[in-house]
Amino acid sequence: MKHKKLWMALIIVFCLVIVAFMVKAYFDGKFDSVESLQAYIQGFGVFGPLVLTVIQALQVVIPVLPGFLGCAVGSVLFGTIGGFLCNYIGISAGSIAAFVIAKKCGAGFVEGLISKEKYDKYAGWAAKSKSYTALLFWGMVLPLFPDDFFCYFSGLTKMTIRKFTWIIIIGKPWCILAYSIFFDKLGGLL
């Protein structure tokens, strides 16, 4: 039991250090454009794909970071498949983390992430809707859906982690693959 608490403390400290580095990079302008993010990722050399994966996970958990930048950068730097894998793994991990955070921290925490109006509009509906699971799935498949926020909202519903994870695993790759192909082709034209 003592070792378990130590490992949890180390994991929390590690996550806080990563978040601190990402926040500093954000305020230093490293996430302002595709070009600035590309330069930032390239600065990590062979660890670039890992850094991009972590950034994509964090951009879901901290919904102020623009996720499409990571999709563009991944595809341009690592190609369609490499960019897709970094983005899919990172975004999926971040989505599941957001769900778990909402389950553990509750409505008060989620309400603090967004405006009261948005929270009241979506959270109440998500908790009561019989079609929420289908909407969530299709939202993960389709581009431009505010899925970061819906990952948090889903954590407030009675949905299980298992069901949510399957929705992410099956629904999320299609949108990310489309972005990866688009940005890889676009990058080849630039």
Image: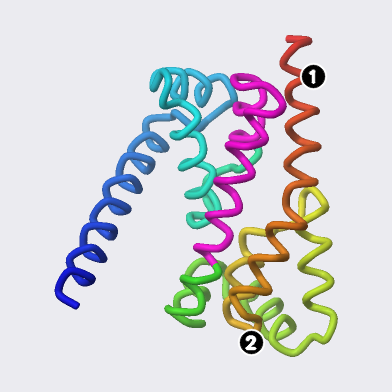
Where does residue 44 sit, x and y in percent of width and height?
39, 22
Q: Residue shown at 57%/27% (left/top)?
A: 33
Query: First in sequence: mark 2 or mark 1?
Result: 2
Residue 70 magenta-highlighted:
yes
Q: Where does label 1 land, which residue?
A: 185
Q: Is mark 2 on a helix, strand or loop?
A: loop
Q: Image check: 103 left or right of 172?
A: left
Instruction: Tell me the residue that label 2 is attached to.
Output: 158
Please tell me which residue is depicted at 60% across the width and 53% down the height of the picture: 92
Q: What element carries label 1?
A: helix
Q: Which amino acid does label 1 sit on?
A: Lys
Give me the residue at 50% from left, 32% from top: 31
- Left or right: 145 in relation to 44: right
Q: Which residue is the extreme one toward the left?
A: 2
Q: What residue type is labelled 2?
A: Lys
Within 10 Å of the Cα at label 1, are there few (<14), some (14-19), or many (20+) other Cα atoms? some
5 or 64: which is nearer to us? 5
Q: Does the magenta stretch include residue 138?
A: no
The percent position of residue 161, horizontal first and vertical second, equals 59, 74
Magenta segment: 69-98
Q: In this view, does 169 lie above or below 186?
A: below
Q: Is residue 138 above or below residue 102?
A: above
Front residue of 9 and 130: 9
